[in-house]
């Protein structure tokens, strides 16, 4: 996780900055990002995956600073909307290092991508082929990939399994849709097919699904070669690399993933008589998740039956993950030392529904009281990017920490922000 240290009991620092200082200066709830942790994770990927294009999956978390870090570290970017694309390019990210995804790209998404000149567009459905070719225009040529369903089941939760047949993404090999789409793309002179893409799921902690995906994808590349005489130069295996949310949980070993995937790719290509394609990967969570910490103040403590409810000043509007996927976090008390024994507590948010539970089984000091500060580690990915303004609660700010200094990256959503778009009566 973020380079946390506990210099004296009860005081937790990230990158040399005590978290309670951040809470005092920026208020809570707040999200803290350890810049060097993000950069280190980028470098770990680049050294673990030589000769590989590493794209950061922007959906995990995006802001201008993040865009700059990713650019400076030499990664590419995976975006899936005009919004992510606009922020990236106005933030200075080179368009040719951007890949556009999406199972339902809007005319605006495609028009912006073409106007800005993104590196590749990943085709996800048959109707997109003609639509994209028409949008490119007779004189243009756009590099594309085709997203394929390899028929591999993987991922931390049903809602984030994307490699199986029975879900909305990609084109099936089993049913022949992928082969058909590839044939059509090859027949469009406005489209240059650089390779195939798959993303089998998210929060995967085992290398085996990736190896199964490699075999299926190389099998398809070989079929394309036999049928069309075309050698596709690129293979994008998506992201999905799992991280540890609580002490004792196992993250996917990136070095092992790289070794195993590249060995499998080499052997599958040798068997198929194909050259080894250039590998592309798209990690999101693993680059930013462990670098983030969420801070909340306790507003109420309530004993009901056998349970102790601890209510904080944020909740499912800034972190919908426990409600959506049943994910467990390990919140901890910071800012004061205590000798009180640990007790089992349910940390809940401030929103108007009973499912607004941030942590059903937190272990916290039994003397926890209103005014206390809680830190939730591993909060960098899919929190703020999935945040809403439910109950018209403004979204929290993002504060970067580096070398003992904190600076604001994204300000808190104000009451003025929350009401500004409401223009009718
Ligand atoms: N590439 C594609 C095409 C994707 O759809 C995704 C994630 C990624 C890469 C990055 O996956 P990652 O490395 O971050 O696992 N909201 C869920 C996760 C949804 C992931 C969606 N696609 C969560 O909070 O767990």
Image (cartoon, rainbow, N blue to C red):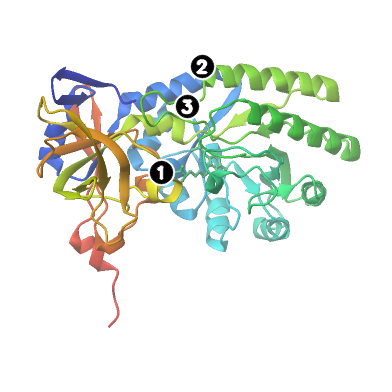
Q: Residue at x 29, y 76 (%)?
A: 423
Query: Label 1 CB, ligand 1: below 8 Å?
Result: yes
Query: Label 3 CB, ligand 1: below 8 Å?
Result: no
Q: Residue at x 61, y 39 (%)?
A: 199
The numbered mark at residue 382 is: 1
Residue closer to the observer: 201 or 190: 201
* On screen, residue 106 above or below 37: below
Q: Residues within 10 Å of mark 2 (few under 14, many from 20)?
A: few
Q: Which residue is mark 2?
A: 47
Q: Rounded to the nearest whole Å, what is the CA distance between mark 3 and mark 2?
A: 12 Å
Element assignment for label 1: loop
Q: Rounded to the nearest whole Å, what is the CA distance between mark 1 and mark 2?
A: 25 Å
Query: Label 2 CB, ligand 1: below 8 Å?
Result: no
Q: Residues within 10 Å of mark 1 (few under 14, many from 20)?
A: many
Q: Is residue 268 left or right of residue 72?
A: right
Q: Specify the quadrant that holds the N terminus.
A: top left
Q: Residues within 10 Å of mark 3 (few under 14, many from 20)?
A: some
Q: Is residue 385 left or right of residue 220?
A: left
Q: Residue furthest front?
A: 305
The numbered mark at residue 74 is: 3
In the rendered structure, which disc, 1 or 2, sits on the residue that comes first in sequence?
A: 2
Closer to the eye: label 3 or 2: 2
Instruction: Please state the horizontal and vertical placement of residue 62, each as a whole percent of the image.
Output: 39, 43
Residue contact between numbered discs 1 and 3, judged by CB atoms under 8 Å: no
Q: Residue at x 65, y 39 (%)?
A: 153
Q: Is residue 88 left or right of residue 23?
A: right
The numbered mark at residue 45 is: none
User: Can residue 332 be spotted in the picture?
Assistant: no
- Which image quadrant for residue 351? bottom left
């Amino acid at each position: 996780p973020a380079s946390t240290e506990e210099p004296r009991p009860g005081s937790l620092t990230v990158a040399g900055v005590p978290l309670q200082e951040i809470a005092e200066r920026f208020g809570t709830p707040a999200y803290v990002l350890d810049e060097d942790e993000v950069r280190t994770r980028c470098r770990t990927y680049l050294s673990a995956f030589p000769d590989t294009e590493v794209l950061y999956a922007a959906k995990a978390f995006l802001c201008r600073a993040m865009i700059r870090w990713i650019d400076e570290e030499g990664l590419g970017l995976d975006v899936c909307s005009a919004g992510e694309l606009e922020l990236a390019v106005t933030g200075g990210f080179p368009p040719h290092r951007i890949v556009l995804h999406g199972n339902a790209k809007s005319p605006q998404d495609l028009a912006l991508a073409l106007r800005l000149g993104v590196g590749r567009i990943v085709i996800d459905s048959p109707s997109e082929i003609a639509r994209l070719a028409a949008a490119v225009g007779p004189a243009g040529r756009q590099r594309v990939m085709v997203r394929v369903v390899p028929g591999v089941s993987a991922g931390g939760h049903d809602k984030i399994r994307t490699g199986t047949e029975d879900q909305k993404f990609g084109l099936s090999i089993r049913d022949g849709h992928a082969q058909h789409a590839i044939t059509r793309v090859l027949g469009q002179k406005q489209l240059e097919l650089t390779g195939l893409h798959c993303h089998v799921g998210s929060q995967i902690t085992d290398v085996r699904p990736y190896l199964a995906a490699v075999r299926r994808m190389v099998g398809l590349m070989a079929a394309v070669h036999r049928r069309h005489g075309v050698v596709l130069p690129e293979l994008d295996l998506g992201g999905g690399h799992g991280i540890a949310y609580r002490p004792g949980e196992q993250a996917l070993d990136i070095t092992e993933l790289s070794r195993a995937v590249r060995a499998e790719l080499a052997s599958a290509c040798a068997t198929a008589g194909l050259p080894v394609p250039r590998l592309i990967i798209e990690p999101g969570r693993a680059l930013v998740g462990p670098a983030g910490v969420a801070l909340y103040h306790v507003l109420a403590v309530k004993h009901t039956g056998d349970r102790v409810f601890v209510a904080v000043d944020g909740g499912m509007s800034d972190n919908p993950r426990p409600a959506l996927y049943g994910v467990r976090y390990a919140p901890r008390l910071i800012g004061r030392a205590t000798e009180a024994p640990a007790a089992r507590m349910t940390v809940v948010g401030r929103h108007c529904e009973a499912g607004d539970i941030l942590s059903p089984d937190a272990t916290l000091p039994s003397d926890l009281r209103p005014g206390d500060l809680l830190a939730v580690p591993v909060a960098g990915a899919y929190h703020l990017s999935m945040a809403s303004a439910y109950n018209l609660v403004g979204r929290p700010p993002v504060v970067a920490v580096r070398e003992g200094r904190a600076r604001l990256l994204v300000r808190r959503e104000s009451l003025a922000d929350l009401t500004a778009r409401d223009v009718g009566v």
